[in-house]
Amino acid sequence: MIRHRFWSVVTGAEIPLNTWAIEGGLELPHPNGIVIHPDSQIGPNCRLFQQVTLGTGPRPGLPVLGANVDIGAGAKILGGVHLGDFSVIGANAVVITDIPAGAIAVGIPAEVKPHARALWDREVRSSRGEDPFRRF
């Protein structure tokens, strides 16, 4: 308990000890200012950057993140929304509606950008030294 309090003060993060639904592989590259409601559900291998908030909002319930979800710095995921597997939320986005699997959402309120996924995948493959135009 003391160790948890110490790191909460150092990082400014609010991740309660009674947060029960965080699956393995959660990555917090810069944990400062992250706030997670204890009843939020986080799937395996998700990545949350600094100043991310998972909390209550206009829809009843709390956020549910699928597997391999990336959430950019400063994003707010509010209310009973579901983020599909492999979705990406842009920095400072405010998500108050469901985001389908594999989608990229940006803005306030967040909107899905239908053609952004192809560009994102191409950039990721290129950064790994792969042929960015090769099909999976």
Image (spheres, rainbow, N blue to C red):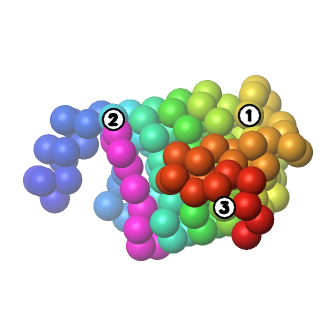
Q: Is residue 103 above or below residue 30?
A: below
Q: Magenta includes 108?
A: no
Q: Earlier in the sequence, mark 1 or mark 3?
A: 3
Q: Earlier in the sequence, mark 1 or mark 2?
A: 2
User: For the magenta stretch, what is the residue range?
Assistant: 22-31
Amino acid bearing label 2: Asn
Which residue ends up furthest to the right in the rendered image? 114
Residue picked out by circle 1: 106
Quadrant, the C terminus: bottom right
Would you call the spot at circle 2 few (<14 residues within 10 Å), some (14-19), or many (20 or more)?
some
Please name which of the two marks, 1 or 2, marks the residue nearer to the observer.
1
Would you call the spot at circle 3 few (<14 residues within 10 Å), some (14-19), or many (20 or more)?
some
Q: CA distance from mark 1 to mark 3?
A: 15 Å
Please name which of the two marks, 3 or 2, marks the residue nearer to the observer.
3
Amino acid bearing label 1: Val
Q: Which percent across, then down, holds residue 22?
A: 46, 67
Residue picked out by circle 2: 32
Which dot marks residue 58?
none
Q: CA distance from mark 3 to mark 2?
A: 24 Å
Residue 127 seen in the figure: yes
Which dot marks residue 86?
3
Residue at image point 61% right, 28% down: 92
Q: Secondary structure at mark 1?
A: strand
Q: Is residue 12 left or right of residue 119?
A: left
Amino acid bearing label 3: Phe
Q: Residue 42 falls in which quadrant of the image?
A: bottom right
Q: Is residue 10 above or below residue 88?
A: above
Q: Is residue 93 left or right of residue 39?
A: right
Residue at image point 34% right, 39% down: 30
Q: Secondary structure at mark 2?
A: loop
**Mark 2 and mark 1 in contact (Cβ < 8 Å)?**
no
